[in-house]
């Protein structure tokens, strides 16, 4: 047995390499840590140059306060920092960095050089470190601020190198981190350069929306919806309209006191707020700001500081949900006006044969076609939710899709999905207003149920009544339906109620989302089906009514109701382009 035992204190260079494994996952991690140091030094301009995706070289230059020559050696020592002075500071962190690990960890796995000069100094200092070992310290004269060169990243940890991506992949990761930091700090100018190409530039204007436009593009920013916030608001920022949905979460950014974070709770609430607005499997756009008192945030959860704990998380997520819902339901869009009818007759509100949206009945009862030429009241907004204002229906194809002419494009409308959205919105409105119209059945219908379906009815009978179903027990395993709700002027099929009970017999939840799902099912079963022929009056009536909905471009299940086929796409189909 070894008389000295088997436990030993690890050498300092090995400790630093272990710490580097937690903090430095890839070149983007180095860029993030160096930029955070620059921001904590009150930099107004930060320039990042990379070669080989950051593996060959990373250079971060800032015009911040600089490092005092006496502190240069301390700066690369583990757990050395200027950002914490006492234990209580840890519970009210106002800087991006505070652990004192970043420079030491980066120096342990690279060849690093730091040059820095303070603004009121005649000279600064230069420090070179290789694999955690200090090579040289010398005086240096240059512009105020700090310049950090990191070369040959992971040169002494080859296993890490093998798990990194190609240079282009690593460049994309670096770009993503710089964009997040720029969004979190709109008052600072950022530049990212790779292969002599400027990948990111922000002006440091201090305007959040302008920064979003600079990080992404002006058209993207111009279509975003602001979250309505008051003074001292906790939640702010911008979200995308439903038709801006994406296949990935690459346009979602949560900024907590300027720090980009990941937060499963925020992600889940955002998804819930968009439920029914976007298709399943698609993700909303959101660039969100959270202003929380530092003493209510625990940033010391993970070395990368991307995960946090919040003292008042429930309050914040509740505010987030309400803010997003209010923005979606109150979308300010520019509408077009229809010509005034001289006879004062109102447009028909029903989808049925005969007099329709484009006709009024004259005194002899004959349909008279009215002109529906577009009369612009102000600039057109062609977002998907308002396009129904501008459509001229041309006909129906395959007894499933409506073909319509619109501004600079052809449009196809899924007649079932569109009708489903119309019926659902009306059913939801009437349910919320406790004013569901009903149709008494001439011949009440008896429905036989399984035992679990009877249990579901016991749970759901009050809500089914609020939806417009008049139902009574009719023996131990049967119900009698005496009345059904009227959806868009038509009585719902009595069998819909049985389908609702079947659907929810395995889940007896009566939450608002379950109620919405039941209303969506009722709307689906009552709607025009694929294969149903529609008259011109019905088609015009459907389009006219869709134009008054908040989200007509998606069915209640999140599928699109309308697709746009522009000239370029048509020309590609004919191989003209």
Image (cartoon, rainbow, N blue to C red):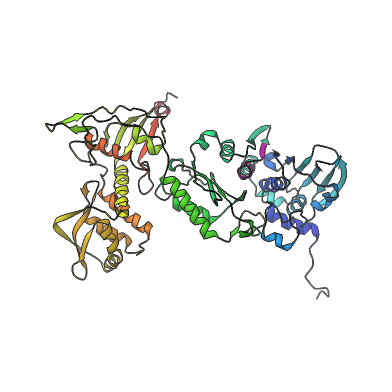
Q: Residue furthest front?
A: 231
Residue in front for this viewpoint, 231 or 292:
231
Q: Is residue 480 above or below residue 574?
A: below
Q: Is residue 537 left or right of residue 230?
A: left
Residue 186 coordinates in the image, percent (x, y): 62, 41
Name, please, the residue furthest toward the top: 576
Q: Quadrant of the N terminus?
A: bottom right
Which contiguous range is marked in magenta? 175-192
Note whether 270 is above or below 507 in the view shown.
Answer: above
The quadrant in which the C terminus is found is: top left
- Choose between 299 and 336: the one closer to the eye: 336
Q: Position of residue 528 (x, y in %)?
A: 25, 44
Whether 543 is among the magenta residues is: no
Is residue 278 something one can see in this rendering?
no
Q: Nearer the viewer, residue 216 or 160?
A: 216
Residue drawn where x is 32% and y is 48% of the image: 425
501 and 207: which one is in front?
207
Q: Say whether residue 183 is magenta.
A: yes
Image position, residue 570 (x, y; %): 39, 28
Residue 184 screen position, x and y as percent: 61, 45
Instruction: Kindly indicate the quadrant of the structure image that contains residue 431.
Output: bottom left
Quadrant position of residue 42: top right
Query: On the image, which quarter does residue 339 sit in?
Result: top left
User: Is residue 195 visible from the viewing direction of this image?
Assistant: yes
């Amino acid at each position: 047995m070894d008389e000295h035992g088997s436990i030993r204190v690890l050498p300092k260079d090995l400790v630093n390499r272990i710490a580097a494994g937690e903090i430095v996952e890839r070149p983007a991690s180095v860029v993030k840590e160096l930029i955070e140091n620059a921001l904590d030094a009150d930099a107004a301009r930060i320039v990042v140059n990379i070669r080989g995706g950051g593996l060959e070289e990373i250079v971060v230059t800032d015009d911040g306060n600089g490092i005092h020559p006496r502190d240069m050696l301390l700066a690369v020592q583990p757990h050395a920092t200027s950002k914490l002075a006492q234990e209580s500071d840890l519970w009210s962190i106002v800087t991006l960095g505070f652990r004192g690990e970043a420079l030491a960890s980066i120096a342990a796995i690279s060849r690093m050089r730091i040059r820095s000069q303070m603004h009121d100094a005649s000279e600064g200092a230069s420090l070179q470190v290789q694999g955690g070992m200090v090579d040289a310290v010398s005086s240096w004269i240059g512009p105020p601020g700090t310049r950090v060169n990191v070369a040959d990243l992971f040169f002494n940890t080859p296993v890490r190198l093998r798990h990194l991506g190609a240079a282009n992949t690593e460049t994309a990761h670096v770009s993503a981190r710089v964009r997040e930091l720029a969004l979190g700090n709109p008052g600072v100018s950022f530049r990212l350069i790779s292969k002599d190409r400027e990948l990111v530039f922000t002006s440091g204007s201090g305007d959040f929306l302008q920064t979003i436009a600079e990080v992404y593009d002006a058209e993207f920013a111009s279509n975003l919806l602001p979250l309505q916030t008051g003074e001292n608001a906790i939640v702010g920022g911008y979200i995308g309209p439903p038709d801006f949905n994406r296949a990935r979460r690459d346009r979602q950014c949560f900024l907590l006191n300027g720090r980009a974070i990941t937060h499963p709770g925020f992600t889940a609430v955002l998804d819930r707020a968009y439920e029914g607005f976007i298709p399943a499997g698609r993700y909303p756009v959101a660039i969100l700001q959270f202003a929380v008192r530092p003493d209510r945030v625990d940033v010391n959860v993970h070395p990368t500081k991307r995960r946090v704990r919040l003292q008042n998380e429930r309050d914040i997520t509740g505010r987030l949900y309400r803010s997003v819902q209010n923005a979606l339901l109150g979308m300010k869009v520019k509408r077009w006006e229809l010509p005034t009818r001289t006879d004062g007759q109102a447009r028909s509100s029903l989808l049925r044969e005969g007099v329709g949206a484009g006709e009024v009945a004259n005194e002899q009862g004959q349909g008279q076609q009215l002109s529906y030429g577009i009369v612009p009241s102000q600039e057109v907004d062609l977002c998907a939710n308002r396009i129904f204002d501008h459509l001229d229906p041309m006909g129906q194809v395959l007894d499933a899709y409506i073909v319509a002419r619109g501004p600079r494009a052809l449009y196809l409308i899924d007649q079932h999905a569109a009708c489903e959205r119309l019926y659902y919105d009306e059913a939801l409105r009437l349910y919320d207003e406790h004013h569901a119209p009903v149709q008494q059945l001439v011949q009440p219908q008896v429905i036989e149920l399984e035992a679990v379906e009877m249990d579901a009815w016991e749970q759901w009978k009050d809500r089914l009544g609020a939806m417009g179903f008049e139902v009574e027990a009719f023996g131990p395993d049967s119900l009698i339906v005496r009345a059904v709700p009227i959806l868009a002027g038509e009585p719902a099929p009595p069998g819909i109620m049985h389908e609702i009970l079947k659907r929810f017999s395995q889940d007896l939840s009566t939450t608002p989302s379950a109620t919405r799902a039941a209303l969506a099912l009722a709307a689906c079963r009552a709607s025009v089906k694929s294969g149903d022929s529609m008259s011109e009056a019905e088609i015009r009536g459907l389009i006219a009514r869709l134009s008054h909905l908040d989200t007509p471009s998606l069915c209640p299940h999140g599928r699109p109701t309308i697709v746009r086929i522009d000239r370029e796409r048509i020309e590609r189909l004919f191989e003209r382009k």
